[in-house]
């Protein structure tokens, strides 16, 4: 989805809890083999011991709103994405986030696309902003035509007020239902809240511009997280804890690894091409500075991402997840926050921000540091 007019990213925030879970403790407890710990590459990852996931999202959102100087009452949309249990049954965490922030005019929307939820929510928010801007322009044009037809003088239009959208994510991978070190292969699951504040039209103070987004899916791979299990009546009806290793083993026994490897190769190339299409950004040019990777284990990134990206762009791969681990739905939003915190992009430079999640879906956001004028 290329935005004819870039959306402004006024702020992005990453909130990390103080608690930590160490890889060597997981090895000592028998939950993780030493070789697997080395493949992951994380010494420790953040753990929220006493903060619920939606409250982590609220903390990140407050930081983003404060950084941009925006009131929650001005938000028109509040998207919240998550992967794992949010703390209540049959309940909307998106509405809770909006309520706690005081965003009572916003329409809360929950997005549950597993690990790709944050990127999906950014796409949804951007599309909503574009549609709102198009509707406002159409209404203004109709009023102008009516005024001219009636012989009256139309009132000069002032600069349009921006529409604001907030995207939050939060996950807490707490036991006993989830083992953050051993519930999956090649990924360590950590706790965090994130927030991204978008507006259209973009403003002169916006930290980044969202130029485009791209997503590619391979729905036939949903079986990797279903395996051979029948449909259960209740959560964790088959096992006492989430065990993605079991379902993936069942998939690999029947299909082998090649279908996923082939889909992953295709998807990474496809989202890069789609994200850059029509933007004027050269995948091999110096203006495309970074490729911000998902927060997966080091071996997974090296074998499945870095090697593949090298055939599609010369942008430098960056892994901001060594000290955080995988943040559930929040990898892409956290990547945006880290780009801003590190002031990684010079004016005019761009970055590709990636995420991927079960289903499978791969996404890429193209962002650019605005060129400032005197």
Image: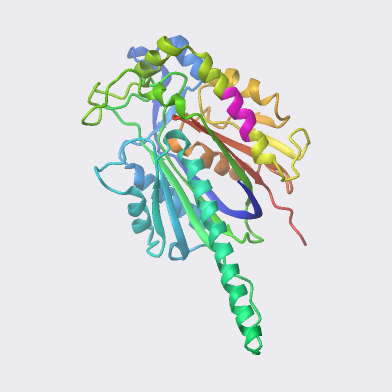
> Is 177 on the left or on the right of 339, as rendered?
left
Q: Can residue 58 be found in the magenta stretch?
A: no
Please give the name of the residue rendered at 64% of the width and 77% of the height, measured from the top-left corner. Answer: 157
Q: Position of residue 5 (x, y in %)?
A: 66, 56
Quick check: 78 above or below 304? below
35 or 142, which lies in front? Answer: 142
- Location of the C terminus by quadrant is bottom right
- Pinpoint residue 131: horizontal percent, then vertical percent: 54, 59
Please name the residue shown 40% across and 23% down the image. 223
Going 65% across and 34% down the picture, which residue do you hit? 272
Q: Nearer the viewer, residue 305 or 326?
A: 305
On screen, residue 325 above or below 167 = above
Q: Which residues are magenta?
A: 264-271
Horizontal relation, residue 16 to residue 85: left or right: right
Q: Position of residue 338 (x, y in %)?
A: 57, 40
Q: Position of residue 172 (x, y in %)?
A: 35, 36
The vertical placement of 89 against 321, above or below, is: below
Viewer-side residue, 350 vs 275: 275
Name the magenta segment's main secondary structure.
helix
- In the image, residue 269 lies in the stretch drawn in magenta: yes
């Amino acid at each position: 989805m290329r935005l004819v007019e870039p959306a402004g990213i006024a702020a992005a925030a990453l909130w990390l809890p103080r608690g930590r879970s160490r890889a060597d403790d997981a090895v000592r407890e028998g939950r993780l083999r030493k070789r697997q710990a080395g493949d992951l590459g994380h010494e420790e990852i953040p753990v929220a011991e006493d903060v619920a996931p939606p409250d982590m999202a609220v903390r990140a959102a407050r930081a983003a709103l404060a950084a941009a100087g925006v009131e929650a009452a001005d938000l028109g949309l509040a998207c919240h994405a998550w992967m794992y249990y949010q703390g209540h049954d049959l309940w909307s965490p998106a509405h809770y986030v909006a309520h706690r922030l005081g965003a009572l005019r916003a329409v809360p929307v929950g997005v549950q696309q597993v690990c790709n939820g944050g990127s999906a929510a950014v796409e949804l928010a951007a599309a909503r902003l574009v549609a709102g801007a198009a509707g406002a322009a159409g209404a203004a044009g109709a009023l102008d035509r009516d005024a001219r037809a009636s012989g009256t003088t139309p009132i000069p239009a002032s600069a349009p007020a921006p529409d604001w959208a907030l995207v939050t994510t939060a996950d807490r991978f707490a036991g006993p239902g989830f083992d953050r070190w051993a519930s999956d292969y090649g990924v360590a699951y950590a706790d965090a809240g994130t927030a991204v504040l978008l507006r259209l039209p973009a403003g002169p103070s916006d930290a980044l511009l969202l130029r485009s987004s791209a997503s590619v899916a391979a729905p036939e791979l949903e079986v990797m997280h279903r395996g051979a299990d029948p449909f259960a009546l209740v959560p964790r009806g088959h096992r006492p804890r989430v065990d993605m290793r079991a379902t993936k083993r069942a998939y690999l026994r029947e299909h082998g690894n090649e279908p996923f490897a082939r889909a992953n190769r295709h998807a990474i190339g496809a989202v890069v091409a789609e994200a850059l299409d029509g933007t004027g950004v050269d995948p091999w040019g110096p203006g495309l500075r970074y490729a911000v990777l998902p927060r997966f284990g080091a071996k997974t990134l090296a074998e499945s991402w870095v090697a593949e990206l090298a055939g599609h762009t010369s942008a430098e791969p960056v892994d901001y997840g060594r000290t955080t681990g995988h943040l559930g739905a929040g990898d892409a939003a956290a990547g945006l926050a880290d780009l801003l915190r590190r002031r990684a992009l010079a004016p005019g430079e761009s970055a590709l921000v990636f995420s991927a999640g079960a289903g499978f879906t791969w996404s890429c956001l193209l962002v650019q540091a605005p060129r400032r004028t005197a």
